Image (cartoon, rainbow, N blue to C red):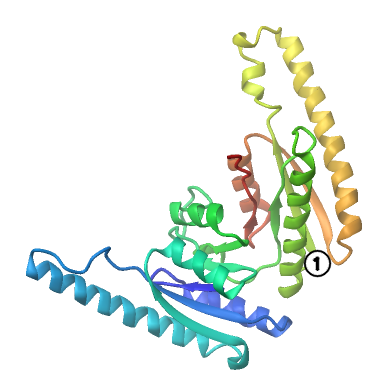
């Protein structure tokens, strides 16, 4: 499912989709999402007229984007649909109705933005969408040759089995996309902070600096052992790609961001597990 709206970078999507179409028999649904005002009628007649003109202009602009992108893809494997409403909700509905396996969209950040990996819209979509989301940042271009995947250490939690299954699922998705893009490696990132290394070194922790350092070192060794075993197990399951591990010290959001910029220019796969 490919999301098309006023922020869509058509050139980037066209290059990626034509590459995927050439390397697979994937089917594409181009979903044009027209984001309008919650209501089109206002007490002020001039405001109502402006709202209608904006809606008409937006509809036509999105329609043109969808038509232009559709013309670049195999017609027998490409469908189009225009919907009007809230972006995340319309995407979620379309995923369920059409049983999509992957959502692709232009990231809701400006080119050259060195801030967070995802904008607020993308964060909501990743959290709520029932399938993986590929958010393509404008400055990344289309000459992709490296994929980064962030995983969590799973042996520290009661739900370790589900966390392990989730990490392996991420790798399987990454391997599938690597095959579509003719890439032979996956870069696997895990960022650790010794369960709050700053707290361990704090006077409030009630331990000496030497004890704190020993704890952090022991945690690092255990994490390295876990990572080594995970990589062995994962590589046995994924023979089509080579897995390249990166064990990074620091808070996951910050370190993942920096490392993905340094080592990979493809895209970033990761997930946050929320318990309700």
The x and y percentages for residue 87 are: 42, 64
Task: Report the number of numbered marks.
Answer: 1
- Where is the N terminus found, in terms of image quarters? bottom right
Depth check: 49 or 219 in front?
A: 49
Residue farthest along the bottom direction in this orientation? 76
Per the image, the residue denoted by label 1 is: 184
The x and y percentages for residue 209 are: 70, 10
Q: Is residue 14 visible?
A: no
The x and y percentages for residue 38 are: 27, 63
Q: Residue at x 39, y 83 (%)?
A: 63
- Tell me: residue 199, above or below residue 275: above
- Where is the C terminus found, in terms of image quarters? top right
Depth check: 207 or 261 in front?
A: 207
Answer with left or right where residue 97 lies relative to residue 65: right
- Tell me: residue 262, above or below residue 208: below
Crowding at dot 1, Cα within 10 Å, few <14 / some 14-19 / many 20+, comes out as some
Q: Quadrant of residue 39?
A: bottom left
Q: Is residue 214 visible?
A: yes
Depth check: 158 or 64 in front?
A: 158
């Amino acid at each position: 499912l490919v999301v098309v709206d006023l922020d869509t970078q058509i050139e980037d999507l066209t290059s990626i989709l034509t590459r995927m179409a050439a390397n697979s028999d994937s089917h594409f649904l181009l979903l044009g999402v027209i984001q309008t005002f919650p209501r089109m009628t206002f007490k002020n007649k001039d405001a109502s007229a402006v709202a209608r003109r904006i809606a008409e202009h937006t509809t036509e602009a999105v329609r043109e984007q969808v038509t232009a992108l559709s013309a670049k893809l195999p017609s027998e494997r490409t469908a189009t649909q225009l919907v009007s409403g809230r972006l995340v909700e319309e995407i979620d509905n379309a995923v369920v109705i059409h049983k999509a396996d992957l959502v692709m969209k232009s990231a809701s950040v400006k080119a050259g933005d060195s801030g967070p990996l995802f904008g607020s819209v993308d964060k909501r979509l990743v959290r709520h969408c029932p399938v993986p989301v590929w958010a393509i940042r404008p400055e990344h271009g289309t000459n992709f040759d490296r994929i980064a995947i962030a995983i969590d250490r799973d042996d520290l939690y009661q739900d370790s089995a589900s966390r392990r299954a989730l990490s392996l699922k991420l790798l399987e998705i990454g391997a599938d996309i690597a095959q579509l893009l003719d890439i032979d490696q996956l870069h696997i990132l895990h960022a650790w902070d010794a369960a709050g290394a700053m707290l361990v070194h704090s006077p409030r922790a009630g331990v000496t600096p030497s004890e704190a350092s020993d704890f952090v070192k022991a945690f690092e060794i255990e994490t390295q052992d876990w990572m080594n075993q995970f990589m062995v197990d994962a590589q046995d399951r994924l023979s089509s790609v080579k897995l390249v591990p990166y064990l990074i010290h620091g808070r996951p959001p910050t370190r993942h961001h920096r490392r993905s910029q340094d080592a990979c220019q493809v895209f970033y796969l990761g997930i946050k597990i929320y318990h309700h």
